[in-house]
Every structure is written in structure tokens, then in C-alpha cells.
Image (cartoon, rainbow, N blue to C red):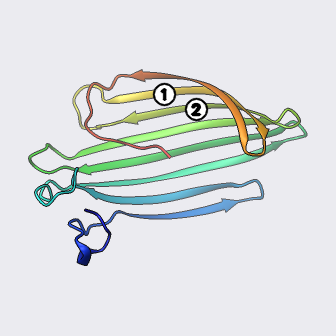
Amino acid sequence: NGSGNQQIGDIDPQKDFLVYYEHLLGELASGFTLFYYNGTTHGIATSSTLNNEFNYQRLGFDISQWFQVGDLGFVSLQGGYIRSHDNNPANVGPDIDGNAFYVESDQYITGMEVTFYERFSNIDFNVDRNGNSTEQIYTVGVAKPLQTWVRVSADYTYTDNRFTGITSQVALL
């Protein structure tokens, strides 16, 4: 039902698209990314559900900066933001706007080849909703490579979930 070619029976010729710009800064892979995502879904795509069109947009950025700390290793500071808009069909409910952001820091220790990381995320699923629609996520962890393609990691995540219902989805980078 979604062959990508309208002449071969694709009942939903609308396609999602993503536009982004990525720029690297310096020699340590610091940089930033700007993006815009536009998508359409009909739930389960059948000829009878094409009138239940869900349109959604995501606009955001991500930025990171790496610092060398002498012979000890590296520190990375990162952050990002996403603004979401879900254009719902009239029979489903009102349009929904959301916000999400995160900040993270990573510390890589040379010699031990261990990375410690901390992350805070704040997701507001519906900024216009009366009551709280926010979820806050706190993560701390450690990672160590064992071989070229194998790494072991452990982390702990605490979620302060004040959100009381599903009204939108905001994805983090």
C-alpha cells in the first residue's frame, strides 16, 4: 500500500521530507545541525482512511562543543531543541504544539578509555493543555569500549513523569 510510485497503486502519494544543514567546527568534531521535518500519516493506509490525514512538523537544532583537557581526555557539552506541531483531523481533536530540549555533558578519560555522561531532557507534549503535560528525564552513565566494535555501558535513568495522557509525540535527536 505504499510502493512510492503512484502509478503502481500507491494510495498515499504524499511523502515525508527532511531538510537539514550540518556544520562542523574545529578539529574535534564540534558543530551544529539545523533541521525541518514535515510528515503525513493516515494511520493504517487504506483507501477508506485517507481522509484521516495527520500532518506534523518538527523544527529544531542540535549543537555540540568538544574541549581537550590536557592529557586527561576530552569534555563535550551538547544541547538541542525541537518544536513540534501536529495538525490533527477535525474528528480527532485540536492541533497540538510541543517543545523538547536536552543538555548533556560527556567526559572521556584518556588511557582508561572510559566515558562518563549526564543528560537532562525536558519534553512538553502539549504546551496549550491545561494541566501538566511535561516529562523530565535525568540520565547518568558510563561506557567503555572492549573491542573495536564492542562496548559495554551502564546507565541509570529517572523519569519525572507529570504527563497524564498521550496527545502528541516529540522525538529527541
Pointer 2 local density, CA inside 10 Å: few below 14, some 14–19, many at least 20 = some
- Location of residue 165 by image quarter: top left
Q: Are marks 1 and 2 in contact (CB under 8 Å)?
A: yes
Tell me the quadrant of the picture where the N terminus can be found. bottom left
Label disc, if present, on residue 65 of the rendered structure: none
Q: Is residue 25 above or below residue 70?
A: below
Left of 89 or right of it: where is 115?
right
Taking 48 as reference, is 136 above or below it?
above
The secondary element bearing badge 2 is classed as strand
**In what element is the residue under mark 1?**
strand
Tell me: residue 34, above or below residue 67.
Answer: below
Q: Earlier in the sequence, mark 1 or mark 2?
A: 2
**34 left or right, relative to 123:** right
Identify the residue at horizontal 10%, vertical 57% (top origin). 48
Residue assigned mark 2:
119
Alpha carbon separation for disc pair 1 and 2: 8 Å
Closer-to-camera residue (142/74): 142
Residue tagged by mark 1?
137
Taking the image as shown, residue 104 lies to the left or right of residue 47, namely right
Name the residue located 32 percent from the left edge and 58 percent from the top edge. Answer: 39
Q: Amino acid at mark 2?
A: Arg
